[in-house]
Amino acid sequence: MVKLAFVSEMMRRFRRDQRGNVLVMAGFLTVPVIGIVGVTVDYSRASNARQALSSAIDSASLMAARDAQKLTDAQLRDRIDSWIRDNLPASAKKEFTGASVVIDRTARTIKISANANVETTVGRVVGSQYIPVASNSQSTWGTNKIELALVLDNTGSMSNSEKMTNLKAASKDLINIMKDAAIETDQIRISIVPFNTQVRIARTFKDQEWIRYGLTRRVNCDKWGNNCTTQTMTKTTWAQSAQGCIADRDQNYDTTDGGSYAASAQQYPAFWCSQSTLAETLPLTSDWTALTNRIDAMTPVGNTNVTIGAVWGWATLSPSAPFMEAKPATEPRLKKYMILLTDGDNTQNRFTTTQSEIDSRTRLACQNIKGAGINLYTIRVIDGNAALLKECASKPEMYYEVTSASQLSPIFKTIANEISAVRLTH
């Protein structure tokens, strides 16, 4: 504003001054003054054109990444030019001179460099007909290889406030998004770990070395808790009437994954199911129908032990026993994720009903899971230990607070889109 006021005052003085030399000087000064103003205007237009070009090629880069697997290189280049033009404002379309596109199908990247020539207006007085502008963008096409564990609270309180109904719908939404994002066989695989105080696994595992038999329980006690009968868990009992449930491993193995199973303390204890309707754990798979069916099989029953759910979610993402489906962390482009959802405080594990003691086990399990390179999302559904779940999440923004069960579907969609999204890598 000061500069413009100065120029205006100078022009008024020139008009008032009738001396010949001033008029001559005014004639000489008019051209550079007009040139300066013109260049300022033209560079402002060029700056706007560059912003529009950057936005357009970012959009084209993402769309190219989305369709890279379906189109040839020539088709991609043609469409990129069209996408850029379509996303430019009308005033900038004629200024676009074309895009340079580099497609690397090994690295799965698309690099776009675009140029535009902005015609000058008053600035032509100083000899510049165009101002060239340029921008570039890079995207990684397709998704990474993804292994995702859904660790879902199946306790009795999930029957309240339509939590289980909404959880099932949200889980199916997530599964469908991941299904649509997969462009290669087994590129995206998901496991499902329903939990309460225990987890259930397929009884076909009965002969595995990592299962431990021999735990006991007291039954048929009198009303004073005396004169009980002691039962011992055997392989036959577990494989038939016990329904395949597993309790916490001995401490401190209860917060870790896998390892050697030579010692009984390291093995997973077979136990009677507290609730026989608890849905079985489904290992990593890209069988979308099986995943949907397992979600439908979930039934809310029993108390809460977040630790065992988290540890078995980790087990499904680990290439070592008890499950062998996962790829090693060194696999190229592989990302591992866990979504841990609960609606209540820890209330019971194999050792205690003291919440603070169980919380400490959950905290250790979460630390170990993140230490193994797994990206951990946590979701608190109305109730539960918010501080613990925030601490468990890999990042603050990976913790979600749900105050109404109807919020579950949007949150699951957000997470699914985040995990599977193509990304700009400027």
Image (cartoon, helix red, strand yellow):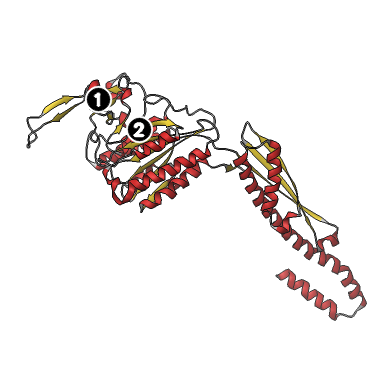
From where the camera sits, is residue 113 visible? yes
The residue tagged 1 is 240
* Residue 281 spot, x, y in % from top left: 35, 32
From where the camera sits, is residue 396 visible? no
* Residue 113 spot, x, y in % from top left: 70, 44
* Residue 247 spot, x, y in % from top left: 27, 31
Residue at horizontal 71%, vertical 43%?
Answer: 78
Vertical position of residue 283 compared to residue 80: above or below: above
Among the 4 quarters of the image, the one containing residue 154: top left
Label 1 neighbourhood size at 10 Å, few (<14), some (14-19), many (20+)?
Answer: few
Most foreground residue, 383 or 353: 383
Horizontal side of 313 relative to 43 (left or right) equals left
Quadrant of the drawing holding the C terminus: top right
Tag 1's secondary structure?
A: loop
Q: Amino acid at mark 2?
A: Thr
Return the mark for residue 281: 2
Horizontal side of 105 relative to 187 (left or right) equals right
Q: Nearer the viewer, mark 2 or mark 1?
A: 1
The answer to whether mark 2 and mark 1 are in CB contact below 8 A is no
Q: Amino acid at mark 1?
A: Gln
Which callout, 2 or 1, points at the residue further toward the start of the chain? 1
Label 2 neighbourhood size at 10 Å, few (<14), some (14-19), many (20+)?
Answer: many
* Residue 304 spot, x, y in % from top left: 27, 41
Most foreground residue, 172 or 85: 172
Horizontal side of 115 relative to 371 (left or right) equals right
Vertical position of residue 195 compared to residue 48: above or below: above
